[in-house]
Image (cartoon, rainbow, N blue to C red):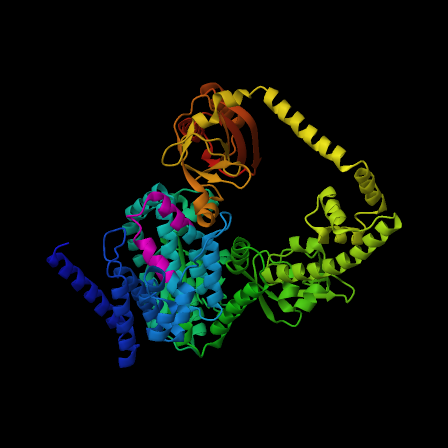
Amino acid sequence: MTEAELELENKEIDKRFQSLLRIMKDRVDENDKKLIRKAFDLARDAHAEVRRKSGEPYILHPLEVATIVAREIGLGPVSVSAALIHDVVEDSEYTLEDIDRLFGDEIARIIDGLTKISGVFDQNISLQAENFRKMLLTLSDDIRVILIKLADRLHNMRTMESMPSHKQVKIASETLYLYAPLAHRIGLYNIKTELEDLSLKYTEPEVYRDIVLNIKSSEAGEIKYLKKFSSVIKKSLKKEGFDFTIKERTKSIYSIRKKMINQGVTFDEIYDKFAIRIILSSTPDHEKADCWRVYSIVTDHYRPNPERLRDWISAPKANGYESLHTTVMGPEGHWVEVQIRSERMDEVAEKGYAAHWKYKEDASGVNKLDMWISRIREMLENNDGSALEFVDEFKTDLFADEIYVFTPKGDLKILPVNATPLDFSFNIHTDIGLKTLGAKVNGRLVPLNYKLHSGDQVEIITSLKQKPKEEWLNYVITSKAKANIKSALKSEQKEIAGDGREILKRKLNYIKVKPSESLIQEMVKYFRLKNSTELFYKVGMGVIDNAQIKEFMRDQSQGFYSYLKNRILGKSRKAEKTALKPPKEEDDKGKKKILVFGNEETELDYKLAKCCNPIAGDDVFGFITASEGIKVHHKNCPNAIYLQSNFARRVIKAKWISSEQSEFAIVLVIRGIDTVGLVNKVTQIISNDLNVNIRSINIAGDEGIFEGLITVVVRDKTHLSTVIEKLKVVEGVTSVERRYAE
């Protein structure tokens, strides 16, 4: 690099730092400026010789992360300083002790939370899951760790072009699986939306491009329509003396894709791609009433859809989000979503947790978020499983949509969607949960696995004699309930196992057998149990009775050598049978001849995953399982994001090299308007015109609409596309889609 180029680079770095200081100017004093400058100087020194994959100096990354923290999240000088040095400990000679000495305990603690776990982990353990758990441990003390991590992830997602495609997919999958839901849960909607859109760009690049092109081609017309739609509302609002701003909003690329999949529709069939947001300049005392007044004005002009009213002003989301959403019928028969909120609500919606501290007098929002953080703390304290188990529970419990239910006295409780009365009872108090006998919902007795709905009033019936049962674990979804049930069951099992030990000792003594440790271990093996505790428990419960113990002793008396002989003989006979067994015809054809793996394109044994049924020509990847070898998955597999996010080291490239002599059974979902002779037309096209074998067909009609599943046998993706296109032209058929999951 020439001196001139180096000088230009340094000027750019200084320019970006000055831009950061300008963003912070209203939030800092001279001491704060010195702190930020000190952090910048340290980061610049630590990363002086390092460059990113793109070729740009590494220092630009922490600078951009700090800018996101300052501008898009709205945090203060401590967070900005921590963001500037967030990679220093991990990527340079500086230690946490150095950071503590130079910047104090507060910043050192944040950096510790942001620094990845070092060390060697078992191949079956997700390093990413471990890092995520560690980060959440710090969250319970300081949420700024999460906020900076999200800013770090956002900048990495913005600058992934120079990375290899497999790394892009891995990072994007992690983002969709963990970080985007986390941003949503904390209330950072803008960041959440951008993370989702960028993830889609790398996980489904073709789909992403198609949606972007469709948005661009229709955007001008839609915006023109929305301005016309808004002009009527503006006149009325001005007449009523409101101080307001109206923004036209485009639905995110990812949410459009999600709707297309969930509803089985095309881009053109999504009616609410665009929306308007009305932001009111209103005082906290009047903002709720003002929002409802605006709602009244909007619905005076346009007819609302009663099924699409969302009142998050009366009952804000757990992350503090407040807004009034309605969908109304606009001119020319177009549905338009209208969001109504105050400036305070809008800032909280955009900056999430950080904005709560600005509006601390609104205790309701802060308390709700504090409640969520305390639930995380509770989860961490009660979790003794693997990191992956923890992450799965975390997603289920804390990322889920919410329902609002009431106690008999009218107190509001917030639970995840699909929560049960048993979840509700543990939410109230652990002791109530453990003694739950039954439940009433809206005055009616319901089973303990009944799924609650928003607005339900729940009464728990308890009994001092009641004890938790193992099947309860299938009745609950919240981590608190699961952890307490498991803990209670373990305690009970321990007691029963203690009794079982004494019972077994007495039974062995009765038949004149000394209960030695070696004998106990032989019994564990004989009954195919995990350990002696399980043996004692089963004896205590009466599952292993006198007859079984006597049978064990009879087998023992036949002698160890005869037992060993049988084992060896059995194995050798099995091996003989295997050796003599002729190879299957399928092996001659060889699945491994049509797929290769890795950069070297090696032929390996594999199985096609049943969860997504990939076929020749599909974009696929291999996954090395613990016990079943390589499983091949479609990139659109329902499990793809989970596998690529948590087990990236076990994901390998896969490439089709042939589709000869291969057959794949594929399920097609067909929908449309029921017409006479439809089934005949469909079967004729598939069987006669295309000469494709139909494994099964099931089409049902209701009120003039039909939906059906057809299983066809095809050679590859091209062959399948031909079948789908031919079926789409049948009169009455509106959509034909491949179903990936069984």
Name the image quarter holding the N terminus.
bottom left
- Image location (x, y in percent) of residue 246: 33, 64
Q: Determine whether 501 is above or below 630 in the image.
A: below
Question: Residue drawn 25% across and 65% down?
Answer: 45
Q: Nearer the viewer, residue 494 or 399?
A: 494
- The residue lying toward the viewer, choosing from 673 and 235, is 673
Residue 108, image x and y in percent?
39, 71
Question: Which region shows up in magenta?
Answer: 150-173
Pick the residue in front: 470 or 192. Answer: 470
The residue depicted at 39 percent of the width and 50 percent of the height is: 171
- Looking at the image, residue 275 lies above or below residue 364: above
x, y percentage for residue 295?
43, 66
Magenta stretch: includes residue 291: no
Q: Is residue 309 visible?
A: no
Residue appearing at x 72%, y 48% in the figure: 521
Q: Position of residue 505 (x, y in %)?
A: 82, 54
Q: Main secondary structure of the magenta part?
A: helix
User: Between 218 and 642, which is closer to the camera in this rendering?
Assistant: 642
The number of discs equals 0
Displayed quadrant of residue 343: bottom left
In the rendered image, which quarter contains the C terminus? top right
Tell which residue pokes out farthest to the left in this image.
Answer: 4
Inspect this view and state whether residue 403 appears: yes
Q: Is residue 539 left or right of residue 634?
A: right
